[in-house]
Image (cartoon, helix red, strand yellow):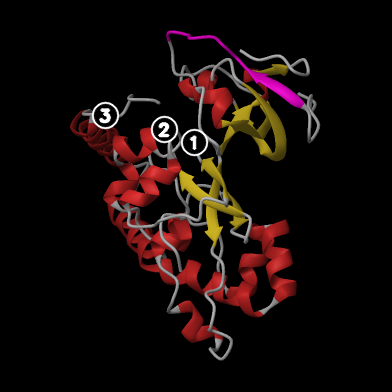
């Protein structure tokens, strides 16, 4: 699975809520952030937890503002997110 | 915030014991070897390791540069590594500066660089810390007795995937005359997680 996102790119975390293990933290779901690092390639835990074959994919460090995640606060939170849980985000859009 | 693990420690322990017993019965795992590997790993794991890394970075700007660029490649210079488990884990060191302060958490469970920090403290695994530090780090730090300069930007690093994080604290003022060994003695585990000043 090729790298789909570049450093500095705006991305949106998936909004889904599957019935099985999902590594994407709940508080980040649906939020828009910025790719600040690529932290290696790893199989998607959501698939591994179900015993499904999982190919290696990039895991990005995504920086979110507290305002985007929680509606307030002046800090930032970074979350390491598998590529499958990210999509491109339009500039300026908010959840 | 995942609550998957809450209250289920006993059930998970029972499952692990069951699987371990099966592996032993089928001759796939030697229980003595397992204990020996675990004991050796924990004996090597200590916050003194993280403190040595920080002291070197304070004394040697070139090392600091290498550490921040690729911590896994820099650790062997001090005889350290992020290996010891099934595979080497990626480490990212995040530096505190006069503009930015960093805090580490794993909101999913308690992921953390054990080799450099030793076994994790109870508060690090608590749901209260995991849930609250991402929402209001300044208030959580205040409860640790750490009043953060309101002018500092704060970044919380959620280590819930494959990378592990360690904070590089700022070198305290007035320590220009101290050598690396004494500087290492100033560094605490809480400082390496960003919940205490050094």
Is any part of residue A23 visible from this angle? no
Mark 1 — residue? B160
Of marks 2 and 1, which one's residue comes earlier in the chain?
2
Relative to residue B105, is residue A87 depicted above or below? above
Mark 2 — residue? B108
Q: Residue at x 46, y 36 (%)?
A: B134
Who is closer to the viewer here, B8 or B22?
B8
> In this picture, which residue range is highlighted in magenta?
A10-19
Residue furthest to the bottom: B177
- Regarding mark 2 in the picture, which secondary structure is present there? loop
Do the residues marked 2 and 1 share a common chain? yes
Q: Residue at x 56, y 67 (%)?
A: B170
Name the magenta segment's main secondary structure. Answer: loop
Can residue A13 be found in the magenta stretch?
yes
Mark pair 2, 1: CA separation: 6 Å
- Where residue B114 appears, as percent x and y from the top left, is 43, 56
Label 1 near label 2: C-beta < 8 Å?
Answer: yes
Picture quadrant where residue B108 is located: top left
């Amino acid at each position: 699975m090729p790298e789909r996102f570049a450093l500095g790119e705006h991305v949106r975390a998936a909004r889904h809520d599957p019935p099985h293990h999902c590594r994407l933290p709940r508080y980040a779901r649906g939020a828009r952030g910025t790719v600040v690092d690529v932290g290696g390639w790893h199989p998607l835990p959501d698939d591994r937890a179900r015993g499904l074959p999982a190919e290696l994919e990039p895991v990005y460090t995504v920086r979110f503002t507290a305002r985007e995640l929680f509606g307030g606060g002046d800090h930032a939170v970074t979350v390491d997110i598998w590529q499958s849980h990210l999509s491109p985000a339009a500039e300026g859009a908010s959840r | 915030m995942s609550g998957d693990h809450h209250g289920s420690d006993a059930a998970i322990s029972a499952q692990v014991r069951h699987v371990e017993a099966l592996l032993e019965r089928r001759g796939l795992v030697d229980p003595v070897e397992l204990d020996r590997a675990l004991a050796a790993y924990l004996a090597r794991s200590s916050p003194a390791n993280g403190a040595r890394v920080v002291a070197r970075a304070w004394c040697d700007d070139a090392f600091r540069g290498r550490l921040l660029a690729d911590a896994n490649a820099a650790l062997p210079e001090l005889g350290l590594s992020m290996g010891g488990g099934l595979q080497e884990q990626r480490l990212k060191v995040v530096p505190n500066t006069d503009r930015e302060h960093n805090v580490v958490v794993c909101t999913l469970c308690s992921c953390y660089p054990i080799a450099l920090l030793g076994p994790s403290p109870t508060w690090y695994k608590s749901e209260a810390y995991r849930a609250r530090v991402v929402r209001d780090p300044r208030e959580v730090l205040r409860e640790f007795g750490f009043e953060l300069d309101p002018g500092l930007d704060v970044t919380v690093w959620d280590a819930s995937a494959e990378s592990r994080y360690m904070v590089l604290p700022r070198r305290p003022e007035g320590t220009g005359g101290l050598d690396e060994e004494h500087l290492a003695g100033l560094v605490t585990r809480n400082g390496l997680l960003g919940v205490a000043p050094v």
